[in-house]
Image (tube, rainbow, N blue to C red):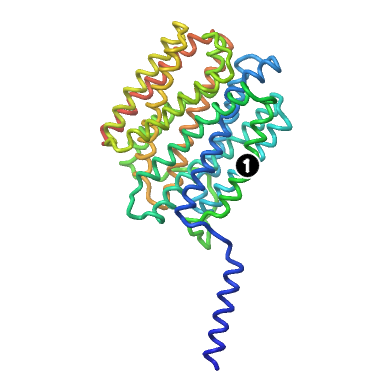
Amino acid sequence: MSSTLATENDSTRAAAGAVTRPFRLRHGAGFWVIAGAFLAVMAFSTIPTPLYALYQARDGFPTWVITVIFAAYAIGVIASLFLVGHLSDLAGRRRMVLIAVLIEIVAAALFLVWNDVAGLVVARTLSGVGVGALTASATAHLSELRAVARPEEGPRLAGTVSTVVNTGGLALGPLIGGAFAQFLPQPLLLPYAVFLILLAVAAVAVALVPETVERAEERPPYRPQRISLPMEARGAFSAAAVAAFAGFAVFGLFTSLAPSVLAGTLHQTSHLLAGAVPFAVFAASALSQIVFVRVAARRQLILALVLMLLGLAGLAFSVLAASLPVFIVSGVLAGAGVGLQFRSAIAVAASLAAPDRRGEVLAAIFLIAYIGLALPVLLVGGALVLWPLVPVLVVFVTAIAVLSVPAGLRMLRRG
């Protein structure tokens, strides 16, 4: 009798647990859900790239205002990475990814209802905040989900997927925005409405993904981003950080000023082309990481330096000679080099971190990368007030080359 009651009580508790325990996807499925959400958010973040010319034509503001609107996004990323990008180590990966997607939903709604210059600055800043909360959290979450789902596999696929969806999303955004502007009505509204729906679906899916961080009962006091590295690891980290800074500065050029270069210097006014060129740059970045994934890390870094230097030299020549083919080919070469260089920087940074500090160190690398996205573009915007576009861009690409080479060589010496 007593054993029967015990069995019944156990069954009752099991049934109650089944009712109260929320449904969760398996870790393998969760890996691809997070990858998809990561891709959608990054694509949304670059949707406005080919649309800036339409905003400029509608509102009549000068080119330097575009750099301010773009920099608002990067400043939002930087602030978010500094303040909350590392919190997934404590609060949980899924929670931070979900918060980031919800922030992007709010940004999409703002683009729909408030799209003058002030509204663009606010919406872009908010979009940047969401990206800053997402990047390191999603990168770490992907690594941990895959490690549980396929423990025998090693970290290579997770690392490749995280960097590919990051740069692949950045690639898709301008292409989608340019296609909407070229072929569909209401190009300043419809893309944001479509992404509002996509992001809402992503938020529901992310809520079903397993958590990979066990939250401590006693949380340490909040502090902004910082990096705790052994003294001997700081040189390697600084080299990776400079490489990430330089690479994202190239991305900043193409996501802010490429349409202006195409229209003003190269005399190309196609909205689809304005989206296709940044797409080609970011797609080359993602593709290079896939094509060369099995190449030794040292050779990847050497190839990255060669491609970066060829691409940057070609970009300088293309604006001096007003050559569209050279501009496109050089952008693709530079993008491929940035992809390999950034992947190397992420790998170096991750190798320096203890497992419980991985999110923190990755957030620091993304923080420095997004400073590279914002600061050079802001400097270019200020320079454009005083000087023409072509000499400003030549100085810009020269400075990026000067930063990239020493950083790459220092990482090579580490390997």
Q: Which residue is mark 1?
A: 103
* Residue appearing at x 47%, y 11% in the figure: 324
Q: Quadrant of the C terminus?
A: top left
In the displayed structure, would residue 33 be above or below residue 321? below
Classify residue 367 as left or right of residue 190: left
Identify residue type, mark 1.
Ile
The residue lying furthest to the right in this view is 113
* Residue appearing at x 57%, y 29% in the figure: 176
Dot 1 lies on which element? helix
* Residue 150 drawn at (x, y percent): 37, 54
* Other-residue count near label 1 (Cα within 10 Å), few / some / many at <14 / 14–19 / ≥20: some
* Residue 181 drawn at (x, y percent): 63, 23
The residue lying furthest to the bottom in this view is 1
The residue lying furthest to the front in this view is 183
The answer to whether residue 350 is seen in the rendering is yes
The answer to whether residue 238 is seen in the rendering is no
